[in-house]
Image (cartoon, rainbow, N blue to C red):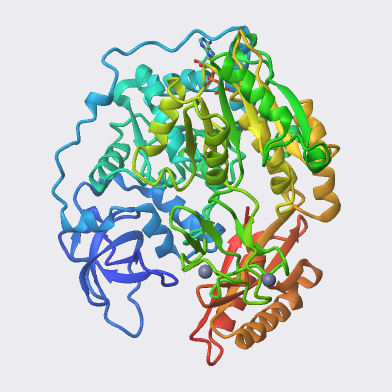
Amino acid sequence: MSNAFADIILPVAVAGSYTYGIPPGIHDEIQRGTLVTVPFGQSKSSMGLVINTHNTPPTGFMPKEITGVIPLQTALNERITDFILWVSDYYMALPGEVMKAAIPSADDLVSSSVPRKKRSSANSIAAEIIPPAELNALQNEAYTGVKELFNDHEVVLLRGVTSSGKTEIYIHLISEQLAMGRQVLYMLPEIALTTQIIERLQKHFGAAIGVYHSRLTPAARQDVWRRAGNGSLGAVLGVRSSLFLPFKDLGLIIVDEEHDSSYKQYDPAPRYHARDAAMMLSRIHGGVTLLGSATPSVESYHNATSGRYGLVELTARYGDVKMPEMIIADTRSHGKKKKAVSHFSSRLLDAVGEALAKGEQVILFQNRRGFSPYLMCSDCGWVPRCTNCSVSYTYHKSAGKMKCHYCGKSEALPGVCPECGSTAVTTRGFGTEKIEEEIRLLYPSATVARMDQDTTKRRNAASQILSAFAGGATDILIGTQMISKGLDFEKLTVVGILDADSMLWFPDFRAFERSFQLIEQVSGRAGRRDRRGTVIIQTADPSHIILRQVLKHDYKAMCRTQLEERELFGYPPFTKIIRIVIRHRDIDELNLSSARLAEKLREHLGKFVLGPEFPAVMQVQKWYIKTLLIKLGKELSASRVKEMIRKAMEAELKMPRQGMLRIHADVDPQ
Ligand code: ADP
Ligand code: ZN
Ligand code: ZN
């Protein structure tokens, strides 16, 4: 007998599912994973995802009926449904929020279910398909090692130093999956990287591989979505959202640069970690996951050395290119010796000058954006700040304004200090824009380019900057994290890390690990077979333990010391962290609510609850913020704790006068 009712989730922020009637005639088509149209609220045809069918009529109301089945949706299957519900459960997001993230072309699908003409991307595909490069002995050993470990591990970590040929190994693994008729998802943390890698992959896989990210046109996205679903697309190269493509049969997920924090989604919900969610997706498909990095997260390395994951290490660069020489430039001598020019030590300037004279290229890395992070009165120390967000304004020279990076509010520069009347309100710190300006003055005949959030807003802008540099049209490239990975640059020999201290002293328990990873990664771009690269790190703390480890490229030592710290202070991987973010328009109400919530949680969790505290930025766009940190020891059941937290949050939201209260949980915050 066929079922009369279906439980359906809708892409809206409500808890739970809705029950609808299944009209006669479409019974056969309705099952877990079917995408349907249903009347909901004001809308006559909202999209819904069937998660269950049954014969239990709902009590107290007459269910409305499903109005249709969205055509071509046979692609959506039980697997994606299982995944959506797992993400919702694990990351404490509403199922509808996950569904919204999972099916981005929802409106398109409903409004125009006529399949669009397949976008031809043939022009960008190499005419001739060439076989993968032959692996050298070490690479081959790593490749067979990975495959063997997959016999008894769902997850394998490939730690391969920069330029060791990890990508070549991925290419071999992809070929193998495609030959078996299974699909592959190759994930990268940033869009800018996909454009570089896709060209490399299309040489080998032609139209069998597609690319997926948010900057594609809706039609192109929908095309990948359909072809991943019907299995005609063998492999997808994508960013974190590609996890939600309705793959038919995934044999392998590759998570490249697995340590990268941009795999975690911050806002909006679902706040998922794409690396960790990938492992669950693979499991749902009966596939495997390969994590790759030159500098894995200490969590992953810990999992690998403790046997939970398989571990393969590739320690030599392809073609025996030497690791770059690492040099520390002590910025403390700046004032004394009068040798430094502005933000650049003489050490760095000498190296840049030499490189340019030899026709070589330079990268200058600065972990900040904008001309100057803040302005300050040199006489009294007053700093202009955004009144909405309580963060210092960033000075944007081109616009001649100060701008808030959280809410976008901007103001004209203060002519005089409102505190003391001094006219000496000057710029402090430095960003990529300032560096560019100074470098242009220092090297007027060099071609200089800058790559940061401001210069890469246009579609393709990032890949244009990178190609110009790769092609030798640019001598000096200045940039943020964005330039830390991706292409190999033939003539790049000098990398300058302009301000290591700002990375090291970022207030986060992962700051040391992140600094090591960033410096290693940027350094990895320097040097080729015939010329060894040089990396110059500017710092006021030359004996810092992380810098000493970076000098020796000693990843293992970094990992060991960081893990010791983590264990000592109770951080992941030795605990699990859930952050609860409480926001209110009224600061007194916020204090009351957060204290009440903390108290309730402490009844169950006691010392595991930290806070509530105001975060560094305590107000964003008129919302005051407090956070609670829950550190769960291994002895606690995370799922039971989450259920308890969920109930406590709901109870608090139901208190009177809480219309302006918002609470969300961030599981495994980065
Ligand atoms: P990784 O991904 O570890 O940074 P890549 O796979 O990008 O390393 O390899 C670095 C460079 O060496 C690339 O230009 C790549 O084409 C080249 N390379 C690596 N392995 C081989 C190989 N077996 N045959 C030919 N070229 C190789
Ligand atoms: Zn002043
Ligand atoms: Zn603001």
In this view, the residue in front, 633 or 471, is 471
Q: Quadrant of residue 535?
A: top right
Q: Give coordinates of residue 394: x percent, y percent.
A: 55, 59
Q: Give coordinates of residue 169: x percent, y percent.
A: 53, 19
Q: Is residue 516 left or right of residue 194?
A: right
Q: Quadrant of residue 541?
A: top right
Quarter of the image with the N terminus is bottom left
- For this orientation, the residue located farthest to the bottom is 656
Q: Give coordinates of residue 33: x percent, y percent.
A: 34, 53
Residue 202 visible to the viewer? yes
Q: Give coordinates of residue 314: x percent, y percent.
A: 66, 19
**Residue drawn at point x = 73 percent, y = 28 percent:** 347
**Residue drawn at point x = 16 percent, y = 52 percent:** 113
Using the image, determine if residue 558 lies above or below residue 201.
Answer: below
Q: Is residue 94 left or right of residue 372?
A: left
Q: Quadrant of residue 625?
A: bottom right
Residue 154 visible to the viewer? no
In this view, the residue in front, 566 or 44, is 566
Q: Is residue 549 left or right of residue 28?
A: right
Q: Is residue 228 left or right of residue 630?
A: left
How many numbered dots are placed on residues in this image?
A: 0
In this view, the residue in front, 262 or 158, is 262
**Residue drawn at point x = 43 percent, y = 40 percent:** 191
In this view, the residue in front, 162 or 287, is 162
